[in-house]
Image: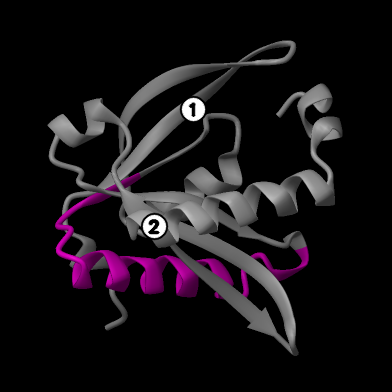
Amino acid sequence: MPAEELERITVELSGSGWRRVLAESRETRGLSLQVAVCEGRIVGLGTCCPQRSLQLQRMGYDGEIGTLYVLPAFHGLGAGRAIIQTLAMRLQRDGFRAMALWTLTRNLRARGFYERLGGVTLLEREEPCAGGALVEVAYGWNDVGALLPA
């Protein structure tokens, strides 16, 4: 992400944004939030919701992972996998059959993670931002059940 975009993000801005999103989701029942906790500290979070991309909806991906973030110190320890599995369970419970998510094409670590989980690349898009555009790739799973714990 361009430095200008990152510099605009503050704890206050992020916190107020999450409060607004969660308040709206209570009204629409559209968003689920999952956190990973280690020794009383939140080390990761993820969200799922009905698919927002019309293109992905038309391709049959009715569910979406909207957010997945794990603190770098906790990469590779299973928090991301646990969050994805829990979100997949939620989507399946709510009647969603398939899911997709977007990640930056340059985020090779995340892309490798999604590929190890069986995600396949579906689409690419550019999102305008300060200083240019972010190029994103969509990963999809045509069966959310494939992500559930064995």
Residue displayed at 74% across by 11% down: 131
Give yes or no for contact between labels 1 and 2 (Cβ–Cβ under 8 Å). Answer: no
Crowding near the residue tagged with mark 1, few <14, some 14–19, many ≥20 C-alpha atoms within 10 Å = some
- Range drawn in magenta: 73-100
Horizontal and vertical percent position of residue 81: 47, 69
Location of the N terminus by quadrant is top right
Q: Can you say whether 88 is above or below 138 in the image?
A: below
Q: Which residue is mark 1?
A: 136
Query: Along the polypeptide, which appears first: circle 1 or circle 2?
Result: 2
Magenta stretch, overall SS: helix
Q: Can you say whether 107 is above or below 89 in the image?
A: above
Q: Is residue 86 magenta?
A: yes
Residue 31 seen in the figure: no
Horizontal and vertical percent position of residue 53: 31, 31
Q: Hey, which quadrant is residue 125 in on the image? A: top left
Q: Which residue is mark 2?
A: 27
Residue displayed at 58% across by 64% down: 45
Horizontal and vertical percent position of residue 71: 72, 62
Q: Is residue 24 magenta?
A: no
Report helix, strand or loop for mark 2: helix
Q: Can you say whether 117 is above or below 138 in the image?
A: below
Query: Which residue lies most toward the top here?
Result: 132
Residue type (three-letter) at the residue carrying disc 2: Glu
Horizontal and vertical percent position of residue 31: 40, 57
